[in-house]
Amino acid sequence: AWYSEVDLPDGLRPLWPAFEGLRQLLNQEAWLGLRRFELQLACYPGHGERYAAHTDTFIGDPARRATAVLYLNPAWEPAHGGCLRAWTPDGDILVEPVLDRLVVFRSDAVRHEVLPAFAPRLAATAWLLGSEAEKL
């Protein structure tokens, strides 16, 4: 589900200022020119669902500059699966989706996938956006 600041359920309202703070920090430290973000809450039910390898930008649309994923799984165990696999110049990285883990990467540069989840997997993803007309 996609959310705006006013649509967030009460228990998740702190996500909005946290992602806004991240946007400001990335602008200050990495000069990405981020103007806003889109927020999605995702649940994989746990029946082997996965998300195939991809990058988070759309062809011809340079707006998505950074992806931030916050995991919301309080009792995650390795047998639950649902890890994020990312390909970097130094090789594959596997990220376990444990509670409060934040992963941030360039939307256009990091190819990644979600491996099969065998227990419910919850995550809040913010795509941090620059101006649609500007390219990095």
Image (spheres, rainbow, N blue to C red):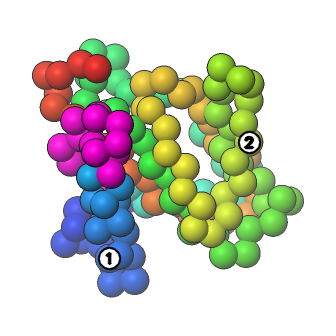
Q: Which residue is mark 1?
A: 13
Identify the amino acid type marked 2. Leu
Which quarter of the image is occupied by the C terminus? Answer: top left
Report the span colored magenta. Answer: 25-39
Q: Residue furthest right?
A: 79
Residue at x 21%, y 48% (from the top left corner): 36
> Is 28 included in the stretch rendered in magenta?
yes
Q: Label 2's element? A: strand
| Spatial separation of the CA atoms under disc 1 and disc 2 | 29 Å
Residue at x 66%, y 75% (from the top left corner): 74
Number of marks drawn = 2
Residue at x 46%, y 59% (from the top left corner): 124
Q: Which residue is mark 2?
A: 94
Q: Is residue 16 left or right of residue 87?
A: left
Which quarter of the image is occupied by the N terminus? Answer: bottom left
In contact (CB < 8 Å): disc 1 and disc 2: no
Mark 2 is surrounded, within 10 Å at the Cα level, by few (under 14), some (14 to 19) or many (20 or more) other residues, namely some
